[in-house]
Image (spheres, grey):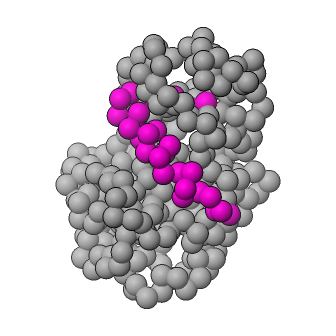
Amino acid sequence: MPTSQLRVDAELVRGLLQAQQPQLADQPLVEVGEGWANHLFRLGSEFAVRLPRREEAAALMAKEQQWLPMLTAGLPTATSVPVYCGAPQEPYPYPWSISAWYDGLDVSLQPRGRNLGLAAPLAEFLNAFHTPAPPDYPRNPVVGGPLASRDAAVQERLHAGMVPRAARVGELWAEALAVPGWNSDPVWLHGDLHPANLIAGNGTLQAVIDFGDLTAGDPAADLAAAWLVFEPAGRRAFRSALGARYDADPYLWLRARGWALCMASNLLAGAQRHPGLYLVGSETLMEILTDDLSWL
């Protein structure tokens, strides 16, 4: 995990709240942890405070603050949309956000066999979210472009021994690269739809979180969740719940499998940075290797 570029503790967060959201400043404040991009604090029983750890993550936070309020209005699924957009303030130099706190479980922490109930609501979310994007949509150097743009990174991981069954994985990757790309207008993408960015509760999808990779492009990038999140029964249910929306593109799911392979290889390569997500990458790779696509 990249090193945080500044110290963030409860005292600093409390100071930001007192200056910018004083009505919340007396709520209990508990440090939950930190991820690749943000420090996370729980504020009272209802809110989460997210503060970027580095300058690169601050740009992702600013993107969420700009676009998410518009994009998430009317969605059927709860999200991490900011309910308050904090401004930089000495000694903290970055934008920061307050969003809703969800008591459910990070989906990466539960067995895949329990994810079947997420298939229909996740499909409902994507059907609502995958709308045409305006010309000024935020660009992402990793997601949103053609799958071939990730070839060098995937090949490097395969040749470096970071990915098991590299020869077979390379064949499946070549199949994904060989099919035609997305030939319609770019649609909005979450951009990082793996299990750790989903919250489950009471057997269903409670929220979709962390839109830092928000961009637009080929919906196949988000549909990679079919392998990132589900076992065979879940993939079948997910595909069924999506309906006929993407049936006109016969190559969509081969590209989606390619994106899943790309994401899995990245999670496997980042074992030291994200040990918990290494298992997600390993399980996803197994789903890809054992899937005969009979559910399509």
Name the residue rendered at 38%, 20% in the picture. Answer: 5
Question: Is residue 57 magenta-colored?
Answer: yes
* Residue 125 sits in quarter: bottom right
Judging depth in this view, the residue of 269 and 185 nearest the camera is: 185
In the rendered image, the residue lying farthest to the bottom is: 248
How many numbered discs, if any? 0
* Residue 122 sits in quarter: bottom right
Name the residue rendered at 54%, 30% in the picture. Answer: 86
Instruction: From this view, report whether residue 163 is shown above or below residue 77.
Output: above
Looking at the image, residue 206 sits to the left or right of residue 50; the answer is right
- Stretch of the chain drawn in magenta: 49-76
Question: Is residue 245 magenta-colored?
Answer: no
Indicate the position of residue 63 as horizontal and vertical percent values. 43, 45
Name the residue rendered at 35%, 78% in the picture. Answer: 184
Indicate the position of residue 205 as horizontal and vertical percent values. 69, 57
Judging depth in this view, the residue of 28 and 22 nearest the camera is: 22
Instruction: From this view, report whether residue 91 is shown above or below residue 150.
Output: above
Instruction: From this view, report whether residue 55 is shown above or below residue 240.
Output: above
Q: Is residue 175 visible?
A: no
Question: Which corner quadrant holds the N terminus?
Answer: top left
Indicate the position of residue 76 as horizontal and vertical percent values. 68, 63
Indicate the position of residue 183 as horizontal and vertical percent values. 31, 79
Name the residue rendered at 24%, 51% in the picture. Answer: 153
Instruction: From this view, report whether residue 136 is shown above or below residue 186.
Output: above
Judging depth in this view, the residue of 159 and 47 nearest the camera is: 47
Magenta stretch: helix, strand or loop mostly: helix
